[in-house]
Amino acid sequence: MIQDTRPPAALLAEQRRRLIHTSVREHGTAVTGQLAHEFGVSAATVRRDLCALAEQGLLHRTRGGAVRSEAARGGGGRRVPPDTGPLPNLDVLARAAAALVRPGDVVGLGAGPAAYAVARHLTAVDHLAVVTNSLRIARVFTHPDGPPGVAPTAAVTLTGGLRTASGALVGPIADQAVRSTRLDLLLLDCRGITRRGDLTLADLTEAATQRAFLHAARRVVLVADRSRWSSGGLAVFGSLDQVDVLVTGTDLPAAQRAAAARRVGTLLVVDAAGGASAVRR
């Protein structure tokens, strides 16, 4: 029997790069910060992974991430026609989700790129109380990087706990802090949504904290673009049945829209201009 003598770090990097390549090939794009959060590594590590994959011709580097290479698209060097019409980006979906928040709400924000994008649209909402396990999100309200002249009025509670590479606070201290709160609204994202409707994350301890957020919330809003559907994830923390409002884009295929509409309370489909249409169960 031949044994693999490569060090564990090399194996982990190889596995991570294989997953990154699969994600870019399937979804067309990837964002460095989002990948860093999903794999629990630094942005610098992800940039090295993307450079290594780009050198193999498996993707093209872009500012802030990567896109599929023409070869990976199977176009033989021909440009593949884009989908009809512009597609909504994460910030547009986040703005639609933030519009569901009312002044005076107690809002939970999990740690993730979509939750961070939503937080940036909440700094002008009056008298919010924010509970989060994300250092990055807490800084949005204490050191806002939004429009000049906008002073945040939110009272922020940071859970405490052990810090992951992505900046999330997890573990028993974080879980207990979340369980002791009562949230009017939870705004969250996920690593993936499985065919069965399970919501997943890449980290087991972060999934436990996300689960505590779900149980503490009176209403749950999930922000999930097309890339989240049928994506993998090590740990299941919830299901679409627990989601009151799912915010997604017009590029989500009709079959997945229909499946989601049967599971969530309201499916909010947002176009590139920010216009939204609601489908209620």
Image: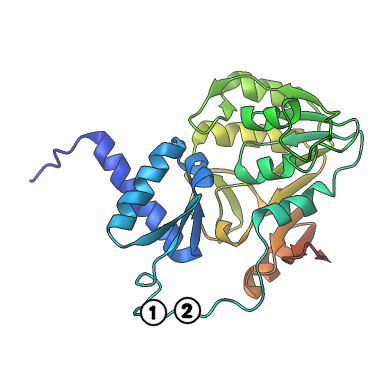
| Front residue (pair 66, 195) | 66
Q: Nearer the N terminus, badge 2 or badge 1?
A: 1
Q: Where does label 2 land, which residue? A: 80
The residue most toward the front is: 148
**Secondary structure at numbered mark 1:** loop
Q: Is the C-beta separation of discs 2 and 1 under 8 Å?
A: yes
Q: In this orientation, which residue lies closer to the viewer: 230 or 106?
A: 106
Looking at the rendered structure, the secondary structure element under dot 2 is: loop
Q: Residue at x 80, y 57 (%)?
A: 265
Q: Which residue lies at the image location 50% right of the left edge and 60% below the top edge?
A: 29
Q: Is residue 234 above or below residue 162?
A: below
Position of 154 with respect to 243 (left or right) is: right
Q: Residue at 78%, 41% (x, y): give it.
A: 147
| Tag of residue 273 | none
What type is the residue that disc 1 sits on? Answer: Gly
- Could you say which is closer to the camera, residue 219 or residue 94? 94
Residue at left offset 67%, top offset 76%: 85
